[in-house]
Image (cartoon, grey):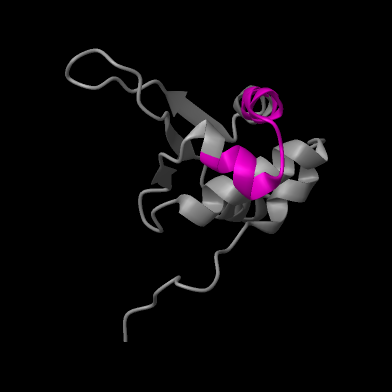
Amino acid sequence: MTQTRANFFMVANEIFSFSLSTKAIAVYCCLCRHADVNAHTCFPSRKTIAKECSLGVSSVDRAIDELIQYGLICKIHRRSKDGGKMSNYYTLADLISHSRTVDDTG
């Protein structure tokens, strides 16, 4: 049976081991919600993230910068073929695999 994520998403417990602001945690959860299960990538617009987290776009930008600073996400700016701006492409760190490696090595 194939597992689908239609009604839920998962966030690694390790996210709480960082000294993140509540806004950064909310944005991280939003990115997890949109992320592909296997590739850990997504590309929601800043406006979508802001709406889903009940934040302003500038607060989303600061939260994304915070997540990048902690190495929890990578952000790539995307452009259309005609050079116009598109939503950013985000890759989320695999915190579950990371925690297993840390736990296994002591």
The residue sitting at the bottom extreme is: 1
Q: Does residue 103 appear in this view?
A: yes
- Left or right of 67? Residue 35 is left
**Most common secondary structure along the magenta stretch:** helix
Q: Does residue 105 appear in this view?
A: no
The residue at the point 24 percent across, 12 percent down is 83
Q: Nearer the viewer, residue 18 or 102?
A: 18
Relative to 1, residue 66 above or below: above
Q: Position of residue 56 (x, y in %)?
A: 69, 31
The residue sitting at the left extreme is: 81
Q: Position of residue 43 (x, y in %)?
A: 41, 39
Q: Is residue 56 magenta?
A: yes
Q: Position of residue 93 (x, y in %)?
A: 52, 41
Stretch of the chain drawn in magenta: 48-65
Q: Nearer the viewer, residue 29 or 82?
A: 82
Residue 36, picture quadrant: bottom left
The residue at the point 41 percent across, 58 percent down is 37
Residue 41, picture quadrant: top left
The residue sitting at the top extreme is: 83
- Left or right of 98? Residue 62 is right
The residue at the point 52 percent across, 74 percent down is 7
The residue at the point 59 percent across, 56 percent down is 100
Q: Quadrant of the N terminus?
A: bottom left
Q: Position of residue 44 (x, y in %)?
A: 45, 41
Relative to 43, residue 106 above or below: below
Q: Nearer the viewer, residue 20 or 7?
A: 7
Q: Nearer the viewer, residue 57 or 101?
A: 57
- Left or right of 29? Residue 73 is left
Q: Is residue 68 magenta?
A: no
